Amino acid sequence: MKTWIIVGVILIGVSVGVIIGVNKMMDSDDVQKSVQTSKPEINNSNETTESQEQTNEMNEVTYDLKLKESPRESEIIQLMHNMTHQKVKADKKWGATPMIPDTINQIYEVISNSDFSRKEDLLAIAERWKNGDFSRVDDDHNYFWNYQNGTVGKARGILSEEEERKYIIKKFGEEYLPK
């Protein structure tokens, strides 16, 4: 009799866990879809660009994040998480948003004018990025990853300049390389 009770309790616990997990996945998918941006047209020229120093100066490049008037904190965190993918080493990456001055400034402005519960942390990260400091971008990525209860794709370092260059070309096109 005790065995059946124990099995029943375990089954109920597993069922509740599955329901919670599915709900979190659905919420995460909804956030991902709501902040997903269109990929810019890729430059198909066969020219190769010499490896350039990675800076946050991207002359004449803009990128509209298509933010709602009052985006939710989770949407901003998802965008910032996607931005870090350009700079971090991780086994899996879902979503990509260019880490350029225009997107950083858009994010910074939204956070500055928000009443987010994590405003202080998010503003500190965005301010570092605005100042061209990406020395802790892997930690930034993992902050967002932990917030989103990540299980796969934890950052394990920062990409080299050449690795980042390849990522930018593949995801956004050569026009997004730093000038």
Image (cartoon, rainbow, N blue to C red):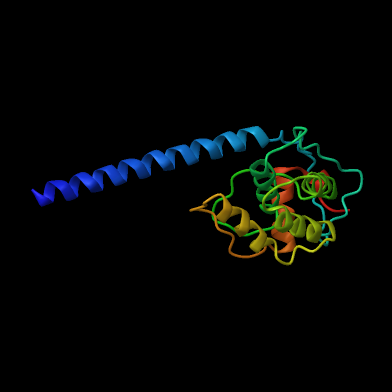
Residue 129 horizontal side relative to residue 167, left or right: right
Residue 158 horizontal side relative to residue 98, left or right: left
> Residue 36's x, y, as percent?
67, 36
> Residue 83's x, y, as percent?
71, 49
Q: Nearer the viewer, residue 103 or 163?
A: 103
Is there any visible trace of residue 47 in the rendered image? no
Q: Which residue is depicted at the point 67% across and 50% down?
A: 117
Residue that sits furthest to the left in the current view:
1
Relative height, residue 155 to residue 62 (above, below):
below
Q: Nearer the viewer, residue 21 or 97?
A: 21
Residue that sits furthest to the right in the current view:
60
Relative height, residue 4 to residue 67 (above, below):
below
> Residue 159's x, y, as percent?
68, 62
> Residue 50's x, y, as percent?
82, 57
Q: Which residue is depicted at the point 87% across and 43% down?
A: 61
Q: Nearer the viewer, residue 75 or 46?
A: 75
Q: Which residue is depicted at the point 75% across and 32% down?
A: 68
Quarter assignment of residue 90: bottom right
Q: Nearer the viewer, residue 1 or 39?
A: 1
